[in-house]
Image: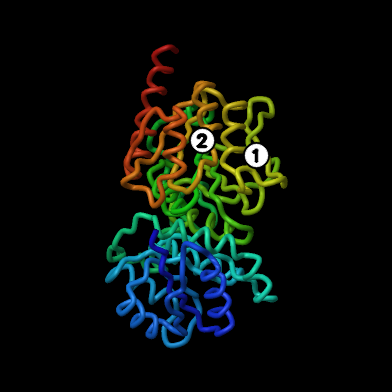
Amino acid sequence: MAKTRVVVVDDSALVRSLLSEIINHQPDMECIGAAADPFAAREMIRNLNPDVITLDVEMPRMDGIDFLSKLMRLRPMPVVMVSTLTERGAEVTLKALELGAIDFVAKPKIGIADGLKQLGEEITDKIRIAAKAHIKRLAQPAPARPASAVGAVAAVAAVASPAVAGGVARPAPTSGLGRISTEKIIFIGASTGGTEATKEVLLGLPPDAPAVVITQHMPPGFTRSYAARLDGLCRIRVKEAVDGERILPGHAYIAPGGLHLSVERSGANYIARVRDGEPVNRHKPSVEVLFESAARVAGPNAFGIMLTGMGADGAKAMRMMRDAGAYNYCQDEASCVVFGMPREAIEAGAAHEVLPLTQIAPHLMDKLRQTHGALLHRV
């Protein structure tokens, strides 16, 4: 079997050497080149035609994000980012995923040699996944709204409506879901490619949508920035989950990196449980943990959504959700970056509908309105 051919791009000679060594120790991959900056990387990609590249963020002459943006428009290929675990690093990494990077590895700030060696299995696993991922050409981004305009809208809305938080104006609820949104709860599981897939689903939800609870495989230090990024884009509120808080309609709660998230009942309310613990299916947070709580606590009030990701995390628990009366959606293969988790859930008999990513939120909202209509009819 042909080996996966990798080019390493990093301005640190030590990191280039370490990553090359880690890659070359694997029987199924080889490092065919190591570049100190994007200009050297461009020539290597042109001449060597690698299967995957690993890409640093901060480099001389051109930073990794500018290079990635050009690469994904002109010659799309699998990219694994190697970024430092800092607040700025988290923001830049999320931008890289938005531009089309498959995944990222959080590079340690100190003890780089020992740290990267300890991350060797994670790095090579992500290279393997990237080599099999579905790559799409990056479209030209839509022009951003000027910051002054955003501020003006927020200022006007703050005077006109109390439903403004965090400086972002939230439109008034228009879908008419009413009390149905307090009874239903949406559970989302995702891994590789899931940051953008989850964003697509959340962007399709109205301000009065049911509460959404999300487990996205992510390490500590990134989920807070991810939640803040989504909160600035979506019509519902988005935040990192806090243990013991009430789960409210019109809000989405993301499992903090490195901790499990589940849902419990407290009287008539749902509350978040954020706990440490052993990895489940090699993951912490684990979709299995979240979906198992959905089956146990929410039953027929739950909607399950399984999005792109490698492996089988959450498949068994999603079948438990279906058996408990939940209604479940899985992302289809064509729109997934990696079809592993949805495929496993489908094969487990957990899915009611298998849909392209762009159709999941509309179908979910139609289903909710049908349910709402039936409730009104019974009343």
Establish if 167 lies above or below 260: below
Q: Quadrant of the N terminus?
A: bottom left
Question: Badge 1 is on which residue?
Answer: 272
Q: Residues within 10 Å of mark 2 (few under 14, many from 20)?
A: many
- Residue in the image at 62% along x and 51% along y: 256
Is residue 39 visible to us here? yes
> Which residue occupies the foreground of this view, 181 or 160?
181
Q: Residue 367, located in which quarter of the rendered image? A: top left
Question: Badge 2 is on which residue?
Answer: 315
Q: Position of residue 314 (x, y in %)?
A: 54, 38
Q: Position of residue 260 (x, y in %)?
A: 65, 45
The nearer-to-camera label among 1 and 2 is 2
Say which label, 1 or 2, has the lower sequence index.
Answer: 1
Q: Position of residue 338 (x, y in %)?
A: 41, 50
Q: Position of residue 324 (x, y in %)?
A: 54, 21
Q: Secondary structure at mark 2?
A: helix
- Residue in the image at 41% along x and 69% along y: 5
Amino acid of disc 2:
Ala
Establish if 334 lies above or below 248: below
- Residue in the image at 68% along x and 72% along y: 114
Q: How many numbered discs?
A: 2
Amino acid of disc 1:
Ala
> Which residue occupies the foreground of this view, 350 or 348?
348
Is residue 158 visible to us here? no
Q: Is residue 210 left or right of residue 373?
A: right
Establish if 331 lies above or below 193: above
Tell me, yes or no, whether the two marked residues, 1 and 2, touch with CB atoms within 8 Å: no
> Which residue occupies the foreground of this view, 229 or 23?
23
Instruction: Give the alpha-carbon distance from disc 1 to disc 2, as whole Å.
Output: 21 Å
Q: Residue 97, located in which quarter of the rendered image? A: bottom left
